[in-house]
Each structure stands twice: as C-alpha cells, then as structure tokens.
Amino acid sequence: MDEKKKVIFSGIQPSGELTLGNYLGALKNWVKLQEEYDCYFCIVDLHAITVRQEPKVLRQKTLEVMALYIAAGIEPEKNTIFIQSHVSAHSEAAWLLNCYTYMGELGRMTQFKEKSKKYGDNIGAGLFDYPVLMASDILLYGADLVPVGSDQKQHLEITRDIAERFNNAYSPTFTVPEPYIAESGARVMDLQEPTKKMSKSGDNPNGNILILDPPEVIRKKINRAVTDSVGIVRFTDEQPGVKNLMTILRVLTGLSYEDMEKKYEGKGYAQFKKDVAEAIVEELLPIQDKVKIILADKKYLEEIYKKGAEKATYVSNKMLRKMQKKIGFIPV
Ligand code: TYM
C-alpha cells in the first residue's frame, strides 16, 4: 500500500534556533501531511555550512532540530528522518545538476541577493549554489510535494525548471514537484518589524519567537510586539503588526479573522495580545517538554538517523545511478 503513496520531501537548516515561523510555515504542516504521504524529513546540514558554523554548535543544533521534528509530532516509525550529510548522493547529484543550471537563474534568487548584501565580499560559492543542492534533495526522492514557507517558493520554481530541463535533454527522469504552501502561516513576520519575515538570524531577538523560548519570554515578546495606534483588531495590510498576530492566532486556534474582529471589538490590543501569547505557549510547551526528553536519549536519536540514512541512501542512489546512466557515464 505504501508504494502508492505520493512522496513528500522537506528540510530545515540546523543553523541557529528554530522559530515560530519554521514551526507554522513548515513543521506543523508536515505533521498534518505525514499520514497521507511517504515522507522524507531531512536536517539539511550541508545547506547550513553555506555560512560559517561553529562545529560543536552545528553538531548540537543538528540533533536539536531532529529532536524537534519528533517532539512536534513527526513519527519516526512512519517517516524517513535523516541527516543530509549522511547521504552522499545529495552532494553528488548537486554537482551533476550544476551542469544543468544557469548562473543567471541563480543570480536572480531573492534569498541569494539578500544574503549577499548582508555578507558583502565574503560570499561563499555555496551560497550562490544553494538552490541546486536543494533541487537535488527534492529530485533524488521523486518528491511530488514539498511543504515549505512562502520564502522557498522561488527555490521550488528553479527546482522545477532544472527537473524539466534534464527530462527534456534526456528522457523523463524526475518528478516535477509542487510546492505546498499553506494559506495561513506561510510567512510569519518579525514582531518588531512586521514587514520583514521572522527569521532565525534576526538582528533583534525581540523580533522572533523561538520554539524553545520559555513561556514568560514568549509572553514578553508578544506583549512588546509592534502594533499601531489604530487600536482596532482588523485584518488589513495597513496594520501589518496586528495582521501578523491575527495570522498566528488563526493557525493555532482555527478562529476566523471575522470572528476575531468581532471578539476584540472595542477592546484595544491588550486582551488580544494575551490570547495570542497563550495560544503560542499552549502549542509550544508540550513540544518543549518532549524535546528535553528526546535530546537526553542520544541512543534513540542515533537509531533513528542511522535507519533514516540507510533508507535515504538506498532510494537516492537508485536515482543517482539513473542520472549518471542518462548522462552517459560508464557504470562500474
Ligand atoms: P530554512 O531552514 O530557512 O527554513 C525551514 C522552513 O521554515 C520555513 N520558514 C518560514 N515559514 C513561515 N514564516 C517564516 N517566517 C519562516 N521562516 C522560515 C521555510 O520556508 C522552510 O520551509 N532551503 C531551505 C531548506 C531546504 C529544503 C530542502 C526545504 C533544503 N533543502 C528541500 C524543502 C526541500 C531553508 O533554508 O529553510
């Protein structure tokens, strides 16, 4: 029966601490989709080294992200959870696909343009090439669907272009994947600058909520979140701070925007903010408790990533061999 299931691939970088954005834009959706699909959830450490990482911290974060996947509800028995660097086909396929990708299209990637502004002259070639590695991740598994936040949409488009280009140059090889971008929560904004995406590496620590932030920190950050002087809870682009908090509340409680507007009518922002904070705490607290237990059991984690690497290696090597054959390499 499993064979008929469509395939999902997605991943998160173990760089820095995961945020509510990562959770609502990606992880929470993975949990929902896991029953219906054959899922590969990867900790993309090869992507993380496109900017310098402290080795000890990278090791810690890699296991922490993995523990977070499981604590958030990804079931290790039903899904393939693995660490990208354990599966060499990703790096090998990235080289091959590099030769089917144009400098021009990589140069147009918004994320590259933004990061290159930030890092100035010290931009590694890896940062430029990053989407090709991401395309390899996805295409090696024949993924049909890739659940991500909206910031990854452009990377999905280039993945589709690369897949189609290769298929046209030889013969149908890759599944051309579709992005899965949820209607709400696909772009959680910075709490201090609500026109910017909430990110792990935000300059202002009050701008993001980390999945592992203690409840009192979450309450404080939401309380300090930038709103406006309008004083009305309303879902409009003119009130980006309020709009962002409403989105968070909607994803966490299912309450519609209309009902929210009614509920807080004439009440200002205090109760609204309190409710947003409590909804976040209620969602994240059980995850935080579980993470601690999972992280303490390194043997358990090791079992999962070893099993994951085995399965992922088997599946991805099959596709890699297919690519090599089509290109014209002599098989061993
Ligand atoms: P990364 O590690 O930056 O983010 C992981 C996931 O979190 C989503 N996300 C957000 N969603 C909503 N609001 C936000 N503020 C927010 N910030 C981040 C991202 O869209 C992403 O889904 N290149 C990817 C990792 C990757 C990948 C892949 C993803 C590598 N290979 C293959 C899918 C398939 C990245 O840097 O994600």
Image: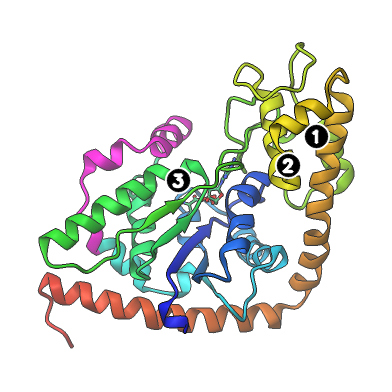
**Residue furthest bottom as drawn:** 332
Task: Determine the residue positioned at 86% across, 17% down.
Answer: 266
Side of 116 where 43 appears, left or right: right
Q: Are marks 3 and 1 in contact (CB under 8 Å)?
A: no
Label 2 sits on a secondary structure element that is loop
Q: Which residue is identified by label 2?
A: 209
Determine whether 65 is above or below 76 in the image.
above
Q: Is residue 54 magenta?
A: no
- Indicate the quadrant where residue 239 lies: top right
Amino acid bearing label 1: Lys
Amino acid bearing label 2: Ile
Q: Which residue is identified by label 1?
A: 221
- Indicate the quadrant where residue 237 lies: top right
Determine whether 284 is above or below 247 in the image.
below
Task: Determine the residue positioned at 25% across, 58% down.
Answer: 163
Would the CB of label 3 be found within 8 Å of ligand 1?
yes
Q: Which residue is identified by label 3?
A: 152
Amino acid bearing label 3: Gln
Q: Can residue 224 be seen here? A: no
In the rendered image, the quadrant that contains the C terminus is bottom left
Q: Please, what is the dominant secondary structure of the magenta stretch?
A: helix
Q: Can residue 47 be seen here? A: yes
Task: Determine the residue positioned at 12% across, 81% down.
Answer: 330
Distance from the alpha carbon under mark 3 to that under mark 1: 26 Å
Magenta-drawn segment: 96-122
